[in-house]
Amino acid sequence: MKRLLLAPLLIALSGCTSDIVVKTDLGEKYIAKKSAIMVAPRNLNYLIASIKEDELKNRAAYFRCVRNLGGRKNPQEFSYCENTYAFWNGYSNVHSVDLDLIRSQSSKVKSDETLWFDITFRPIFIDLNKKKNALDYEEFSCLKENYLTKVFGDKYLNLSKRQPKELSGLAYESMKVKLCKKYAKFE
């Protein structure tokens, strides 16, 4: 009698898996195994560090431009390099304004609060002949809807282009949406 009760339980447990499986309209499958999924929460400090890194790249490009084309020729006008890289009086104007705006918003958002998740995964594709193919790693982002991720995350990290498209209808995109729902837990 005990064996009869244990068998359905074992069958039910073996069917439960933490892998995400999505079928296409033709019956092919995409599988995202838990072991091939990496989740990295990103916060306000990460966004600020990304902006500062971009500022350093901008500064290097500005100094290369000045070295190649020369600096200001007329004291009243800005040089080509200053206009191109928005670099005046020794600092990047664009980055400084953005960092000031973020600091003004930081009272609403804690520096360690998760703003988005970067998810890297490697799916397995199973075709109609049951042949398994491991696809390349892909990274996408699951965003928390707020001003910082919409404006600055998009400006410096292209986060809006890295989001899964929920209304796409493609199996691959729906797998990304399922990964976001499962792993992107915002407080």
Image (spheres, grey):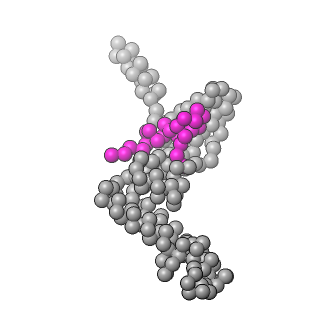
Q: Quadrant of residue 64?
A: bottom right
Against 139, residue 73 (above or below) is below
Q: Is residue 154 left or right of residue 184?
A: right
Residue 186 shows in the view? yes
- Residue 88 painted magenta: no
Q: Is residue 177 left or right of residue 145?
A: right
Q: What residue do we see at 43% from left, 43% from top?
A: 183
In the current view of this chain or complex, which residue is farthest to the right?
129
Q: What residue do we see at 54% from left, 72% from top?
A: 86
Against 183, residue 47 (above or below) is below
Percent coordinates x, y for residue 131 in the rendering: 67, 33
Percent coordinates x, y for residue 58 in the rendering: 55, 72
Front-lying residue, 184 or 128? 184
Front-lying residue, 46 or 153? 153
Q: Is residue 1 left or right of residue 86?
A: left
In the current view of this chain or complex, which residue is farthest to the left?
107
In the current view of this chain or complex, which residue is farthest to the front?
76
Front-lying residue, 101 or 113? 101
Q: Which residues are magenta?
A: 162-187
Percent coordinates x, y for residue 160 in the rendering: 52, 49
Percent coordinates x, y for residue 173 in the rendering: 57, 38
Residue 38 shows in the view? no
- Residue 184 painted magenta: yes
In the rendered view of the protein, which quadrant contains the N terminus?
Answer: top left
Against 93, residue 10 (above or below) is above
Front-lying residue, 77 or 17? 77
Q: How many numbered badges does the structure rendering display?
A: 0
Q: What residue do we see at 51% from left, 60% from top?
A: 156
